[in-house]
Image: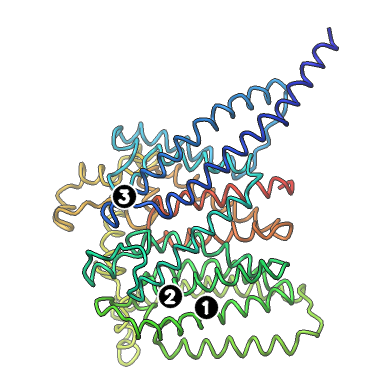
Amino acid sequence: MSNKIKKKTGALAVSDKVILAPAIEYVLAATMIAMCTAVAFYAKDGYHQIGNAKFNAYKTVMLLGFTPFLLLGICYFVMFVMQKKRWKLSVTDCFVFAYLIFATVSVIAGGFYEDALWGSFGWNMGWMSQLSFVLIYYALSRFGRYYKVILGAFCGSAFVVFLIGILHRLMIDPIGFYEELQGNQMAQFLSTMGQATWYASYLAVALPVGVAVFLFAEKKLWRILGGIYMVTGFASLVTQNSDSAYFAFAGFMLVYFLLCVEGRGTINRFAEVCTLFFAAGKVMGFLMQIHPNPDLEYDFITKLILDGKSTWALLAVCLAWNVFLYYRRNRAYQAVKLQWIKRAALVGTAVFVLLIVGLIVLQTKGVFSGRLGEMLGAVSYFNWNDAWGNGRGRIWSFAVRVFARESLLHKLFGVGPDCFSSYVMAVHGEEVQLFWGDKILTNAHNEWMTTLVNTGIFGAAAYIGIFVTAVRRFLKAWQQDYVLAGAAASAVSYMAYNFFCYQQVCCTPFVFLMLGVGEYLARKEGR
């Protein structure tokens, strides 16, 4: 009898390893490749309702791909349980699961059941979307064997999207999306992603992956391909005209600096990255003077990168840095003694952020006078008011008031995924009408604040915990596979960008893709 049981168990193990797992991995890879290409390129009628079109494409891919995946997954799970194996959970896994639980509870706590299922029209970040993000993470973290092919599809699609974005800024339209648009509309829409801010959110997640290849790949061919991808992304970054993207850039460059300072070769490559970024800005500034869009008004940082004298000075500094490192290439490099540089970089970043916040507060209160007051007053970002950050001053102030006035139930558990607009219209309708008229305020234009309102304190803590723990774990193991560095940088870039923006189909599925890939690699390293 015991021999029969052993034979049966052995057969299950073979079925698990030889049949089910490979089938699941193939289905998952096909689904993720389809998602990367469909979201990047699909548009039903040009820019008209392009957000809805892309979400419908995403939803179709998820339903078609994850239906067989889940059926196979259930069979796999049954066999897994029958073999009495233990399912190892990382701290990030636990935060992802907790977030799904609290997002579900928020649907019940909020009471906006129909709105919570698929979310607000045009945004579609309801419970079903949150479930899909969780599935992407768990699926890739367990069955991400073909992650290289998936990342190839992601970056290959992104490269084309970046290239079209550059051509659009030069008033060259290879895809015919600009045919019926006026100059001011062309300034607002870009490439195959639609609104420039949506485009920038996609760029913020995709660009760090190519930078990682350029920085850490050992094979020359991969470095060349990574460099082409990176420079194309930089050229698009400096012309997309959303200042929020530069905060994403600062976030992932800080991550790479902390990693690159550990070795002679990598710090040299980091200096090259900095030089190529400022050089891309100057080249694109020159090209956009040849083919300008007179209706395109540059944001503050974009104008500084393209035309500012100070960025010429930064380019010169980066070139000098490269020359200095080149002449010291044969000298001993003791990374241990440079640990203080990492600490200095982190402390310096914190001090810089606090300094900027302090200057905004003091300038707004009128503390500064004379020349300094005039200089700060000339930069809109140092003057906090309702118009600050393209209206974010009023939106953030309103969102804080909304949360402060919520019941204890809503504070703890939220009003439901993507139910920000439903809640504020039901409870604060007169104030919304007074401030924004017939426009619908779908979110707080700050993903972390929006998550706080939508899923409550518990849901927001779990959501933030996903990113914080993932970045920490990936950076501990990144030397085993530099893709982990790319995953960590993409997550930090996403967090920085969406401090000023929001969840949507052009970026959030892809950051969970990167988190899933990173978790798969971290698990391989025993993390």
Identify the amino acid type marked 3. Answer: Lys
Identify the amino acid type marked 2. Answer: Val
Is 48 above or below relative to 238?
above
Identify the amino acid type marked 1. Answer: Phe
> Few, some or many C-alpha atoms within 10 Å of disc 3 (few <14, some 14-19, many ≥20)?
some
> Few, some or many C-alpha atoms within 10 Å of disc 2 (few <14, some 14-19, many ≥20)?
many
Give the residue number, with chain letter if any, for mark 1: 277
State left or right for residue 302 relative to residue 388: right
Question: Element under label 1?
Answer: helix
Q: Please tell me whether mark 2 or mark 3 is closer to you in this view.
A: 3
State left or right for residue 448 relative to residue 317: left
Question: Residue 252 or 348: which is nearer the viewer?
Answer: 252
Question: Element under label 3?
Answer: loop
What x and y, as percent, mark residue 465? 53, 49
The disc label shown at residue 44, or none: 3
What x and y, as percent, mark residue 394? 25, 62
> Cα distance, mark 3 to mark 1?
34 Å
Is any atom of residue 404 visible in this view? no
Marks 2 and 3 in Cβ contact (< 8 Å)? no
Report the residue at 49% width, 60% height from top: 158
Marks 2 and 1 in Cβ contact (< 8 Å)? yes
Figure quadrant of residue 214: bottom right
Give the residue number, with chain letter if any, for mark 2: 238
Question: Element under label 2?
Answer: loop
Is any atom of residue 283 visible in this view? yes
Q: Tag 3 or tag 2, which sits nearer the N-term?
A: 3
The disc label shown at residue 393, or none: none
Q: Tag 1 or tag 2, which sits nearer the N-term?
A: 2
